[in-house]
Image (cartoon, helix red, strand yellow):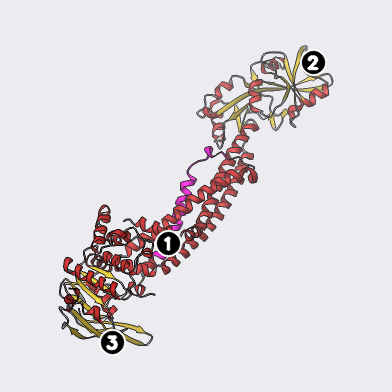
Amino acid sequence: MKDVTKIYEMGNAQVFALDKVTLEIEDGDFLAVMGPSGSGKSTLLYTIGTLLTPTKGNVTIDSKSIYKMKPRQRAKFRRENIGFIFQTFELIAYLTALENVMLPLYLSGSAITKHEDIAKEALLKVGLIHRASHKPTELSGGEQQRVSIARGIVNNPHILLADEPTGNLDQRTGNEIMQLLHKLKEKDDLTVIMVTHDLDKARLTNLILHMVDGRLVQKSNELIGKGDENNG
Amino acid sequence: MRALTLVLRNFSRRKARLILSSIGLILAVTVITSTFTVAHSMQIQIGDEVEKYGPNIIVTPKSESISVPYGSVVVGNVTIPEDFQDGIYTIPNRANLRTISPKIYGQMKYRDSNLLIVGMISEQEAKLKKWWNVDGSLPQDDTNETLLGSALASFLRLSPESSITINDLTLTVVGILNETGSVDDYSLFLPLHTAQRLLEQPGVVSVIDVGAICKDCPVEVISQQIMDALPGVKATPIKQAVETRMEAIGQTANFSLLLASIILVVGCAGVMNTMLASVHERMKEIGVFMSLGADTFHLYKIFILESLTLGLIGGLIGSFIGLTSSVLAGPLLMNVIINVLDLPLYPIPLSIALSVGASLTASLYPAWRASKIDPVQALRMV
């Protein structure tokens, strides 16, 4: 992304959620975005996720300028290339775990007959196949987040965007989720971008971005390898 | 996974709301279905009654001369050949003909009184006048038997098996017609050929009454066909009363449909209100859908499918209630007996289509609102 600015109008005042952010992320990176509340971490995530049109600047993914696309093209690009994980999981309450994972497959318009098998494979990857028929309310927080991850990867995206994925989980479950993300990143060659407040979790990634007032103030890769050690 | 699965799963957890939002549609469809059902049954009933009323076409000679009144029909001196009745069976709409009853009228002096003589074919006349109630029997064809109207029998102090002689012809009374409140009460009925002999008018009749099998059949067309087939006769359709009653039913049905339209509009508003509330409640869910790659087409599809399902449920339940209530309440409130097997099927798909159409229309604005939701704002909602 190059010189990306996102301005919110609040009455007469202008709030710079992103302020001339320029950033290049390589394929297969696992990076954490840190910073205080209101620093623009989530705005950055959703802008990369093709959900939030910047006021200025350009975002390019795989040589495609995504905000020059028409909305329907952008939605198609999103469902084919990007997966989302949220802090509060955001599973659809009236669907089972399996149906939640099948949701992106329905949206992609792929052959209906294969949906169940593909979704089960994704649940197998996150170790939750035995809970496929359960509704979200019947699952623990960690299990819900695993379903959410399965839903995020079921369409084989290149990029997985995680908005504080361990924020609602206890330490041990949070660590398990981080290990799962690492495993999936390695296995599926994913690029993972994770917003977090938790330095311990951020240390498990290979690059940390620090944001303050919508600006990228520090890139740190001094922790590369520590995550592997912790996982190891 | 299909869009319908999403819709049905969503409905399954909001059953009460589903029913509440369908109530307007259910009511409208109930009114429409019951209106069609009752109106149709009333038309059938009137058709049946019309058949019982007697002739619905009267064939008389074309004549300006008037001398003999018989009931509401005025008969001239001019007669028509008896075999004209065969010609009536040659008309294109002959399949609609139920009964043809030729009659001859005349007056004969008996003591100090004038008797009204009616020659008829008993079997045919009785078919037309189903309200006739006879003590005894009807006169057999080509006999000297007679049937007396109640007032005439009382006046002449005659009873079954007594006899009366007119112009040297002795007639045996075989039956007394119970009071009808018509000119029949003062008439002396004879077999057609016996009356022709007595009146010295062999081979001719004064009038031919035609009963057509009609629910809402084209009596004018049949009348015209008779006049075309038999020159020199006038065929008069009796339909004014029927038309007036049919028109009254039509007006009642139209009023009910107007009422149903108003309920349908209110129902639409209810569906729109529920769906707008649903869009607001499910804002975060819509944000999630968008983050997973849903575009406006997907959102429209889901909301329109929801409204179609609502419309279908409203239509089906409304049709069922409408039909059931008509069958149960029709005889009590409208004095109409409704036979479900006699009813046309088209009001049911028509009502369902109307309900679905109305629901669909009501969902367009909520679906548009859903497609305009900012996904990031929706995802940030607590």
* Camera-nearest residue between B154 and A8: A8
Please name the residue that numbered disc 2 is placed on. Answer: B162
Main secondary structure along the magenta-highlighted residues: helix
Q: Judge whether B68 appears above or below B7 on screen.
A: above
Give the amino acid type for the residue marked by disc 2 in the picture: Ser
Dot 2: chain letter: B
Residue A128, by quadrant, is bottom left
Marks 1 and 3 sit apart, C-alpha to C-alpha, by 42 Å
Which residue position holds label 3?
A: A213
Tell me if residue B207 can be seen: no
Q: Quadrant of residue A171?
A: bottom left
Residue on which disc 1 sits = B363
In-front residue for pair B108/B54 = B54
- Residue at (77, 15) in percent of width and height: B161
Say which element carries label 1.
helix
Q: Mark 1 is on which residue type?
A: Ser
